[in-house]
Image: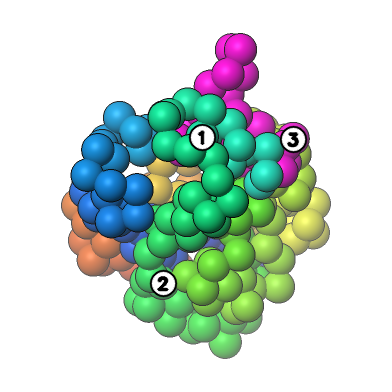
Amino acid sequence: MPKIKYICFDIGRVANVPLSQEEMICRGQNYFGADFSEQTLQKMVFPSLAGRDLWREFQNGKIGSEQYIEAAFQMVTIPSTSENKKIFHHLLKDWCGVAYHPVLNLVDTLNQNGYQTSILSNNNEIMYHTPSADSLKRRVPVAISSHEIGVSKPHWEAYAILLGKVNADAPQEVIFIDDKIKNIAAASSCGLQGIHFRSREIGMDGAFAKLMEELRKKGIKI
């Protein structure tokens, strides 16, 4: 087995703590009124027009933020005024929450111990540029977002781009950490060593404790 040299992180629910759906609805009601509901939020964030998945297109850089936000307002009865569009833009940034400092500190330690750290994130041109994302991005030499490369996890090409960017000699040299098991399965099928960050199941602190256990088992200096 090749020596592990590269450790790659997802952002959402790994290196940041996003707002809960309840918090998002509450903020939406503060902005747009009491009728803003879970259904309204889902329709706006994940718009589908003429059979097109506009969220996926936005994440893959096929459409820009203006077109995405316009589509979001076509899904609901909220007027698509300039002010309302700015508010929705702000709500998407709110969703990203705050940086999760134990992971940021881990990245610093890994860098100090000679590993090359990186990011592979399904993201978009709004949510990729937030304080919580920037906290991780400025710590790593390689940061990759789906909206910049035109493809998102779990497609194999996203992992191939990662391997090329970090210049790994073999995929087994790379550990990939993500909160979604389908992304870990895809990474493993491409030869990377995947670790499932189980924040959706056991919370951030529980997932971080399990991550540290797994890294130690693999002989990573932390």
- From the image, tell me which residue sits under label 3: 62
How far apart, in angstroms, are the residues tagged by discs 1 and 3?
19 Å
74 in relation to 150, above or below = above
Kindly identify the residue that appears in the image at 22 percent across and 44 percent down.
34
- Numbered disc in front, either 3 or 2: 3
Q: Position of residue 103 (x, y in %)?
A: 41, 72
Q: Nearer the viewer, residue 61 or 44?
A: 44
Where does the image place residue 26, in percent across and percent down from the top left? 23, 53
Question: Tag on residue 99?
Answer: 2
Quadrant where the C terminus lies?
bottom left
Amino acid found under the numbered disc labelled 1: Phe
Q: Residue at x 41, y 41 (%)?
A: 180
Where is mark 1, residue-wise? Answer: 73
Is 162 in front, or is 173? 162
**Residue 51 in magenta stretch:** yes
Query: Magenta part of the protein: which range?
Result: 44-64
Task: State the image coordinates of residue 134 (x, y, percent, origin top left).
Answer: 57, 72
Q: Secondary structure at mark 1?
A: helix
The crowding category of the residue bearing disc 1, from other C-alpha atoms within 10 Å (few below 14, some 14 to 19, many at least 20), is many
Amino acid type at mark 3: Lys
Q: Residue 58: percent from the left, percent from the top?
A: 64, 38
Q: Residue visible at 76% across and 45% down?
A: 149
| Total tally of numbered discs in the picture | 3
Image position of 138 with respect to 1: above or below: below
Residue 8 appears left or right of 62: left
Amino acid carrying mark 2 in the image? Ala
Q: Is residue 45 left or right of residue 34?
A: right
Q: Nearer the viewer, mark 2 or mark 1?
A: 1
Q: Nearer the viewer, mark 1 or mark 3?
A: 1
